[in-house]
Structures are given as C-alpha cells and as structure tokens.
Image (cartoon, grey):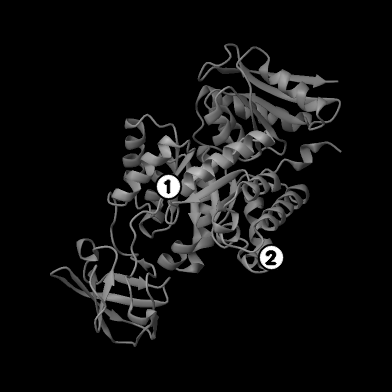
C-alpha cells in the first residue's frame, strides 16, 4: 500500500500553548499530523511567540513538511474587570452599572472596554459566556445600566458578548495593530481577524497588510450575529482568504441551535469561491483531561470531513490539555477513516471560478476522476491553481509544487493538498511525481494528471493538462 493513504484531505490546525511550549512538543504535533499551528495573541507574549515561531520553522525543516503559522488576533477585549472575591451573585431584576476601568463597588462593575461608546438602550449584554443575560436600560456619562434576566454568578475577567451591537470598523485595537506588525516581522502565514462584523473589517486589515508589504493571508473568524446575515456572510467570504466557523462565541451570540446551519452555509460558500474553511471550537474537548474523545466529538470531526471542510482546529486540547499529541493522532485517525469509507462530496459546485486557471482546474479534476489516477500534480506560483483544484473536492491527493516558501506554507491548510517547495523549471511537477514514486508516497506504476504552464514560475500561466504514467 502506498503512503498516499496517509494524505489527509481535511487538515488539522493545533494551538500552541503552555502544554506544548517546547521544541519537542511542537515537533511531535507536526509529526503527529498538524498542518498548521495557531498562536493565540490573547495570551502570547512576543518573547514566547518569537521562540515558538523559530521552533515551528525548525521542526518543519527537519520533518521536510511545510507548516502554516496562524496568528489569532485578540480583537476588542470585551470582558469584565476584577470582581471582589472573584464572586458576585446576581438575581433576576437586578440593575448593574458597567463602567470602563472602574472599581467594583456595590452594583457597579468594571469592564475592560468602554461599552458606553458602542452599546445602545435595548441591546443585550451577555456575560460569562452567556450564563448571565442582561438588557441595556440606559447609557449615560460613561455608564451602561443593564437589567439582569436570570440568577447566577459573575466572576473576574469573564467575557462579554454583545449580539445586537454594531462594532463594524472598530474591531482592530491598538494591541492588534502592534501584534500584526510583530507577525509581519516574524514570518506569519495567516492573520486571524476576531469578531468580524462585516466585509469592511476584512478590507481594513487587507489595506494595512498591503501597506506594510505583507503577503500574509486573512482568516475571518465568524463569531458575531451581524456576520451571519446572508448578504454580509457572502461578502465576508468573498473578501477573505480563509473563513473560520468560530463556534464558541457564535453559539453565545446567536444560539447553539443556529451554529450547525451556519457551519454548513460557510463551508458551502467557501467551496463555491475556492476559499479555505475551518471548523473550530470544542472539537475534541474531552481530551483536555481524558485520553479519549467522546463519541459525539468523533462524530463532529467526522461530519466536518464529510462536508468537505478544509481544516478542523484544536484549541485548549493542544494548548492546555493533558494529551496534546494523542489528541492530534486521534483526530488524524478519525479523518483518515472517514475519508476512506465515506468520500466527501462538495456541498456546492464552484460558481465563481471563471478564470482561465479555474477552467483548467475543473477539466483536470474531471479527467482525474474518469481515469482513476493516483494524484493530481499542480505547478503553482501563487497557489491559485491549487485552490481552484481543491474547490472541486477531488478524491485523490493534490500534489502542489511551488518555488515560493510562503505559498508552500499557506497551501498546507488547503483541502487534499500536499505542498512541496521546489525550484521553478520545466517539468518540475513531473520530476516531483517521480520522486514521490521513488519514496513510496505514490504506487509504482503511478498515473498522474499534471497541471502546469508553458512558462514555469509565471503567475496566472496555468494552461496545460497532461496525463503521465510513471513506471
């Protein structure tokens, strides 16, 4: 059996944190099956992140496996401040006064963001992951007064969700801009934009990255009620390079019952437009403390693969869990078993790939299907050809060869794609296919569909499809 059976079609992103803050742990995460590593800038210091980036690149080089580094921005830090004794009981009907950087005194509670600049009367304010529901009754003199709608307890630094409040255009904070600058200087492949409200937020970040000369791609995290409005969701997907279904905050904002439908909508829109899709939050949460996932978690991961998600992501499981490496290994087994027994089918036919490369890619995937080839080999300068091929969700591996290290790293999150860094040159794809046969990654003989251009290394030059059998 060839090693191509090890090519996951749905990829894995793992979060680096205290449980994996060493070279050995990062090496093992990548070796176990992680294709991308997330650095959470809600918690990371620049010193820690710098070291982790060096470790990731070193391990990637030693394993000869490109890896994407994903910088997850904090976004507006909307949390409570310090609560006396870290415990404050509230009752239905209580009135609370929320003030920026105040001291906790009586029913006055501190917040780490000036809510009075955004919140309006009648809007909901959900605290402690939605456990405490309140409604705004008044906004004046820097104070937001809310009425409590259920009994419960508030604690220090717990998150606040504002499902009715418009934050569009204001989600990048001073800290975020400083973090982006750090990422640009430290080899980041993807920038995750938290709490996206509209496509304008993406355009704002896109302009800043362009101004700084960065080629990092933008991952929009969909976790607000305004982002999932039908017209706006389409615009967000169109404006982004990748879209994450950030199911944790999204469930608090809109209700857990809505999230599975939104997940399917996002995966569909991403497949139509050849964008990377990521399903995230609590996929294997039981493995933070236990050595095995629950049956529901296994089903969750498997279902994401069946729907053709480009990536599934681990957060606390690998950042703080007791079994980070075992979690990645378990997730990989689920993905491989699922793709072997229930081949995923695209939720939608790509509707927006009207370019020359898009047409070539469509024909190549259809040819690969009819001829039952072992792989599709794509020579790509910018990665666009690989994205177009992956949008059709082929059942065979897409072997992408590029001379650009950044492109090779970014392509690691793309469905069914394994990227290789090779110099530009005529027959670069064919030479790589021969190497993979020699190494046992492809069977002998192997039949491949080659997608390339007559001018190697030229952007947008993909214009040729060939079928080759390698003895």
Front-lying residue, 178 or 7: 178
Residue under pointer 1 = 46
Which residue lies under the disc numbered 2? 293
Q: x, y (%) of residue 142?
A: 16, 68
Compared to residue 157, the image places residue 18 above or below, namely above
Q: From what the image shows, is residue 83 above or below residue 24?
A: below
Q: Residue at x 26, y 78 (%)?
A: 104
Q: Position of residue 83 (x, y in %)?
A: 33, 77
Residue 440 picture quarter: top right
Whether residue 119 is visible:
no
**Dot 2 crowding, Cα within 10 Å, few <14, some 14–19, many 20+:** some
Characterize the local packing of mark 1: few (<14), some (14-19) or many (20 or more) Cα atoms within 10 angstroms: some
Q: Position of residue 8 (x, y in %)?
A: 70, 44
Horizontal side of 188 relative to 451 (left or right) equals left
Q: Is residue 216 left or right of residue 66?
A: left
Q: Identify the residue at horizontal 60%, vertical 60% (top origin).
A: 317
Q: In the picture provided, is 207 more to the left or to the right than 15?
A: left
State which quarter of the image contains the N terminus: top right
Task: Identify the residue at horizontal 45%, vertical 53% (top origin).
Answer: 44
């Amino acid at each position: 059996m060839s090693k191509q059976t090890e090519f996951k079609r749905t990829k894995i992103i793992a979060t680096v944190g205290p449980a994996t803050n060493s070279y050995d742990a990062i090496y093992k995460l990548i070796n176990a099956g992680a294709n991308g590593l997330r650095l959470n800038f809600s918690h990371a210091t620049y010193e820690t992140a710098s070291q982790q980036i060096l470790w990731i690149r070193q391990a990637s080089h030693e394993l000869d496996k490109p890896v994407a580094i994903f910088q997850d921005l904090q976004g507006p830090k909307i949390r409570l401040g310090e609560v006396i004794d870290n415990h404050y009981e509230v009752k239905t009907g209580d009135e609370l006064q929320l003030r920026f950087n105040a001291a906790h005194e009586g029913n006055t509670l501190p917040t780490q963001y000036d809510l009075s600049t955004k919140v309006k009367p009648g809007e909901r304010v959900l605290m402690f992951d939605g456990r405490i529901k309140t409604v705004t009754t008044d906004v004046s003199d820097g104070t937001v007064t809310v009425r409590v709608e259920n009994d419960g307890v508030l604690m220090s630094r717990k998150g606040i969700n504002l499902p009715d409040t418009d934050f569009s255009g204001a989600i990048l904070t001073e800290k975020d801009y400083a973090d982006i600058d750090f990422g640009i200087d430290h080899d980041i492949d993807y920038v995750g934009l938290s709490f996206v409200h509209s496509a304008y937020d993406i355009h704002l970040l896109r302009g800043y990255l362009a101004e700084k000369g960065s080629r990092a791609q933008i991952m929009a995290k969909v976790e607000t009620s305004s982002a999932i409005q039908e017209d706006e969701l389409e615009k967000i997907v169109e404006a982004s390079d990748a879209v994450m279904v950030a199911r944790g905050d999204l469930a608090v904002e809109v209700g857990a019952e809505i999230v599975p439908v939104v997940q399917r909508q996002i995966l569909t829109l991403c497949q139509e437009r050849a964008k990377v899709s990521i399903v995230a939050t609590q996929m294997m949460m039981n493995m933070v403390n236990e050595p095995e996932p629950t049956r529901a978690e296994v089903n969750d991961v498997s279902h994401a693969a069946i729907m053709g998600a480009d990536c599934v992501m681990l957060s606390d499981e690998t950042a703080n869990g007791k079994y980070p490496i075992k979690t990645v290994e378990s997730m990989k087994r689920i993905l491989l078993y699922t793709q072997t027994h229930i081949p995923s089918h695209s939720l939608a036919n790509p509707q927006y790939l009207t370019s020359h490369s898009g047409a070539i890619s469509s024909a190549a995937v259809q040819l690969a299907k009819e001829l039952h080839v072992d792989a599709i080999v794509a020579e790509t300068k910018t990665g666009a050809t690989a994205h177009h091929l992956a949008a059709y969700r082929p059942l065979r591996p897409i072997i992408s060869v590029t001379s650009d290290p950044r492109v090779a790293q970014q392509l690691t999150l793309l469905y069914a794609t394994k990227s290789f860094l090779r110099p530009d040159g005529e027959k670069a794809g064919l030479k790589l296919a021969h190497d993979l046969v020699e190494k046992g990654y492809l069977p002998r003989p192997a039949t491949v569909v080659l997608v390339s251009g007559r001018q190697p290394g030229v952007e947008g030059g993909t214009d040729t499809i060939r079928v080759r059998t390698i003895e």
